[in-house]
Amino acid sequence: MERSVAARSPIGSLDILWRPFEAAAGLARGSFQLIARHRRLRIALLAALVAIPLLAGGWLLLRKSSFTAVEHVKVSGVHGPQARAIEAALDEAAGHMSTLGVNAAALQAAVASYPVVRAVHAVPSFPHGLRIEVTEQLPVAALTIGGQRTAVAADGVVLGPGLITGSLPALSDPQGPVPAVGGHVQGQTLLAELAILGAEPRQLMRFDARVYSSPKGDGLTVAMRNGLLVYFGDATRPHAKWLSLARVLADESSAGATYIDVRVPERPAAGFASASALAESASSTGLAGSSGAGGSTGASAATGAGAGTPEATVAELAAKLTESTNGQPTATPGTAGAATSTAAATASSEPAAASTSAGEPESSSGSGESTSPGG
C-alpha cells in the first residue's frame, strides 16, 4: 500500500501572508485615484494636513502661555491646625499649572506629607481660576501607643501628634507597635473602637472622654465626660447604635441614668444608680408608678447623665444632641416608639448590662433600668 504526502509549498505560505498587504495597497490606490478625480477633496485634504499640526502646536503654546496660567486658587474642605499649610502647598503647586492642563497627581503629591488629606479634586475655571476640593480624614481619637501619643483617623491612619486636641477621646494600646505617621494601627479591638468613633454624630463628639473594652463583659464602652457610660458591645451597626443612644438621651425618662446600653439598637436601656433616681426621672415626666415599676412616655429634648451631673451640663448635652434637627430628637425607625420604664432597686454605681434581645428585659435585684423598645 502506497501513501503519498504532498509537500506544502513555501511560496503558497508567503502568498497567504502577503494578501493583507495587497489589500491595504489596493485600498490606498483607490483612495488616491478618488482624490485625483475630485479637486475639492484634494483641497480639503491638503488643508487638513496643514491645519492639524498648526492647531496642535497652537494648543501646546496656549497651555504654556500666560493666557491660561492659574492665577486664582480657591481651596475648600480643609480644617484644623494644618489647614494653612495644606492651602499653601496646594497654592504653590497650582501656580505652575494651566487651566488647560491641570496635573491632579502633582497636587496630590504636594500634600502627600499631610496624612489628614485623603483626596484632592481640582476643577479649572478658564482662563485663570482653579478650585481645589480637599477630602480629609479627620482625627477621631488621641491614641497612646508604645508610650507615645498621636492623633488617629477612623480608618486607623496615624495622623501624628500635631493634630491632637483636648476634645479628642482617649484610646490606649500599651502593647502595640508604634506606627509611623501615615501608617495604619493594628489590632482588632483598637480598630473596632475607632470604627465606633468614626460613626459618631458630630454633636456628641466633644462629650466623649475615652473608649475601652469593659472588663465586666459589657464589650466596647464609651465613657462620656459627664460620667455616663454607653455600652456598645461590639463595632457592628455603629450608626444605628449612636442613633439609638440619641433616642434615649432625648427622652426625659433617661435623665439621671448612669449608663445606657445600646448593644441591641432596637431596644436600648438606661440604667440608674438607685430606685430613687428612677423615681425622680419618672416624676419629672409627670407620670408616677409603683415603687417597683413605672411607665412614662415622652419625646422632648432631655438627656441622660451621670449621677450628680449639673443640670446645666445635662441641658447643654441635650441641646447639642438636637441642634441639627431643629429641636426634634434623633431617632431610628426601630426606636421611634414611646419609652417604657421598668425599675428595680440597686445600690451599684455600675449596674449589670441590660438585656441583649428584644422582648427579654433584664431585672436584677437592686437595679433600675429604663428601656425603649421599638414601636
Image (cartoon, rainbow, N blue to C red):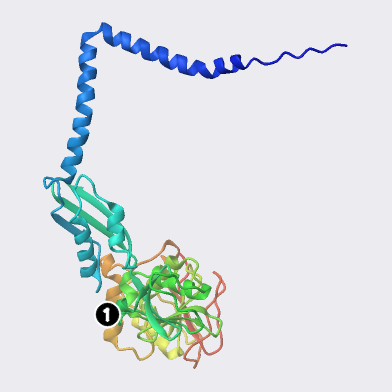
Name which quarter of the figure residue 216 lies in: bottom right
Q: Judge whether residue 297 can be spotted in this image.
A: no
Judged left or right of residue 240, residue 67 is left
Residue that appears at 31% across and 80% down: 167
Residue occupied by mark 1: 316
Judged left or right of residue 63, residue 315 is right
Front-lying residue, 199 or 294: 199
Residue 71 in the image: x percent, y percent? 13, 54
Front-lying residue, 62 or 134: 62
Figure quadrant of the N terminus: top right
Residue 244 in the image: x percent, y percent? 42, 70
Q: Judge whether residue 56 can be spotted in this image.
A: yes
Q: Amino acid at mark 1?
A: Glu
In the displayed image of the protein, which residue is found farthest to the top? 37
Front-lying residue, 239 or 313: 239
Q: Is residue 207 above or below residue 45?
A: below
User: How many marks are shown on the rendered structure?
Assistant: 1
Figure quadrant of the C terminus: bottom left
Residue 169 in the image: x percent, y percent? 37, 80
Name which quarter of the figure residue 10 lies in: top right
Front-lying residue, 280 or 16: 16
Residue that appears at 54% across and 85% down: 215
In the displayed image of the protein, which residue is found farthest to the bottom? 347
Q: Is residue 139 above or below residue 65?
A: below
Residue that appears at 16% across and 41% down: 62
In the displayed image of the protein, which residue is found farthest to the left? 67
